[in-house]
Image (cartoon, grey):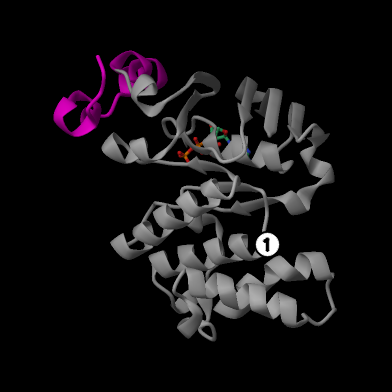
Amino acid sequence: MLEVENLSVSYRGISALEAISLSLMPGELVGLIGPNGAGKSTLIKAILGLAPCQGQVLFNGIPLRRQRRRVTYVPQRSQIDWDYPVTVWNVVMMAQTKSLGWGRRPGNEAKRLTSAALDRVDMLTLKDRPIGQLSGGQQQRVFLARALAQQAELFLLDEPFTGIDKKTEAIMVDIFAELSAQQKTLLVCSHEWGDNLNRYDRLLLLNRKLLADDRPQAVMTMDNIQRAFGSNMPSRFTQPRTMRLVS
Ligand SMILES: Nc1ncnc2c1ncn2[C@@H]1O[C@H](COP(=O)(O)OP(=O)(O)OP(=O)(O)O)[C@@H](O)[C@H]1O
């Protein structure tokens, strides 16, 4: 179980997250939503220990920073340097390098895990291609394969559904269901709206503070959306047919 207790983050004295407390159970697929600048990426980075924060992050009762192998992170595509000269295979193999240590040659088990993960996301045939020569969906699948090869228990994914094709979306949805059935915990930061949000077991609605933490239908109410977005509420929320908001 992941427990976040009283987590606060400030950047140069400006508060980005205020006293966030939440728990994620094994097997849960949880969506993290909120307006631009709400602190979604910051929360994921703070859980990973990559943002300056106060508060505690425990995994199975022990600080997560002491057991980094148990967590894997798929960053936003926009944060990755796609010009970096590395092949699909080597990106996924990086998950093994962490446990092997730099400079040590990967053994058969590392190769097997890499190969199986690439096969699972249907990217094995492109294993020798530089990552800069892939479509957005293919790039996302490579980074998901890297996360799978790490065999972590906790998956943190920052906007994996942004800018991808239907095939990639279907593969990711399938894999998330499999991971959840294997009792892995998944936290997915998302810009999705509408019926797609029903794919999550639970939604966290964030805007600097945690505004709601419940089943999708209970979170996606007009009241909650107004509290999160205030006067900047996008027009899509005023279209109940597509949003299916509960009033
Ligand atoms: N490294 C940083 N230095 C200073 N301020 C930052 C830094 N990273 C984020 N912020 C600020 O913290 C706030 C939260 O940003 P964050 O990127 O976490 O939001 P978000 O919900 O992920 O946004 P988006 O949906 O647009 O990706 C914003 O006001 C942002 O400008």
Identify the image quadrant of the C terminus: top left
Badge 1: residue crowd in 10 Å (few <14, some 14–19, many ≥20)? many
50 relative position to 105: left or right: left
**Identity of the residue drawn at 68% across and 54% down:** 152
**Identity of the residue drawn at 61% across and 60% down:** 147
Q: Which quadrant does ligand 1 occupy?
A: top right
Image: 159 above or below 37: below
Residue at the spot of label 1: 150
Is residue 66 one of those drawn in magenta?
Answer: no
Image: 188 above or below 8: below
Splitting the image into 4 quarters, where does residue 122 fall?
Answer: bottom left
Amino acid type indicated by mark 1: Gln
Q: Measuring from the top left, give residue 170's x and y in whole percent.
A: 35, 58
Dominant secondary structure of the residues highlighted in magenta in the image? helix
SS at mark 1?
Answer: helix
Front residue (pair 19, 171): 171
72 relative position to 233: left or right: right
Image: 99 above or below 24: below
Numbered marks: total: 1
Splitting the image into 4 quarters, where does residue 111 fall?
Answer: bottom right
Residue range corresponding to the magenta coloring:
222-247
Splitting the image into 4 quarters, where does residue 27 fall?
Answer: top right
Q: Measuring from the top left, give residue 196's x and y in whole percent.
A: 31, 41
Q: Measuring from the top left, give residue 222's x and y in whole percent.
A: 29, 17
Q: Measuring from the top left, give residue 45's x and y in whole percent.
A: 65, 41
Can residue 227 be seen from the camera position used here? yes
**Identity of the residue drawn at 69% across and 70% down:** 94
**Identity of the residue drawn at 73% across and 50% down:** 70
Can residue 239 be seen from the camera position used here? no
Is residue 228 one of those drawn in magenta?
Answer: yes
